[in-house]
Amino acid sequence: MSLSLPSDAQLDALREVANIGCGHAANALSRLMGGRQVDLSVPRVLLAGPEDAAGMLGGDGPAVGAWLSITGGLRGVMMLGLSQADGQSLETLLLGDQTSGQEERDSAVSEAANIVASACLSAIGKLTSWRLMPSVPTLRRGSARVLVNAAVSQVEGDASRVVVLEARFMASSTPSVSGQLLLVLERESSRALLARLGV
């Protein structure tokens, strides 16, 4: 795989992986929110450095992010990212009230990220016949740029250029919740994934 100039077939294969994985993640999020509909955008594939990836998540705006390292056939990070306002909306939907303490709110978002990432990796695992396991979630609040840089720094190998599979989601809920799912893969893992798919 030439990561600087991926072929159309390779891009299509990566988009399909993202579509399958993120689709299962969106279904898991829907169940978590009481069956509310969760719509998913067409996934994007980007060869990026950490700064470019951070821009995908909103640049310097306040955000909440929860990420999990991936072990098994792939090396990378799965991240659930939300703006500060969307994070608060998700917490309210999951906990049912506005009076929960910060620790409880953090725990709710971390558990949501764990469920979403597990669903995504399980779907990709079935596609590739790899056993993919997520780590314990790490949750942080701050600017989107800082959060993504922190998540990407967990990727083993050369994190200066990574392959980012990104999809945006929007839940039909009150309050509404939208955010992003980022699957960040180390370069050699991207090559391995495409080879596994025969592309």
Image: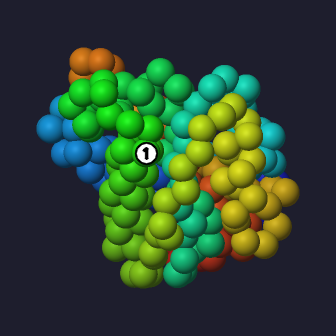
Residue occupying the point 69% across, 31% down: 143
Image coordinates of residue 167 in percent, x first then y, are: 49, 40
Image coordinates of residue 59 in percent, x first then y, are: 72, 28
Instruction: Report the quarter where the C terminus lies.
Output: bottom right
Q: Is residue 159 left or right of residue 35?
A: right
Q: In front: 58, or 13?
A: 58
Instruction: Report the quarter where the N terminus lies.
Output: bottom right
Q: Is residue 154 left or right of residue 50?
A: left
Q: Relative to 49, is 177 above or below?
A: above
* Residue ID for mark 1: 103
Q: In front: 89, or 4?
A: 89
The residue type indicated by label 1 comes to: Glu
Q: Evaluate whether residue 161 shows in this view.
A: yes
Q: Evaluate whether residue 42 shows in this view.
A: no
Image coordinates of residue 2 in percent, x first then y, are: 78, 63
Residue occupying the point 48% across, 67% down: 136
Residue occupying the point 44% across, 81% down: 130
Q: Secondary structure at mark 1?
A: helix
Q: Relative to 140, is 20 above or below?
A: below
Q: In front: 14, or 97?
A: 97
Residue occupying the point 47% across, 52% down: 18
Q: How is the image coloured?
A: rainbow
Q: In front: 199, or 25?
A: 25
Image coordinates of residue 107 in percent, x first then y, are: 39, 50
Q: Relative to 39, is 127 above or below?
A: below
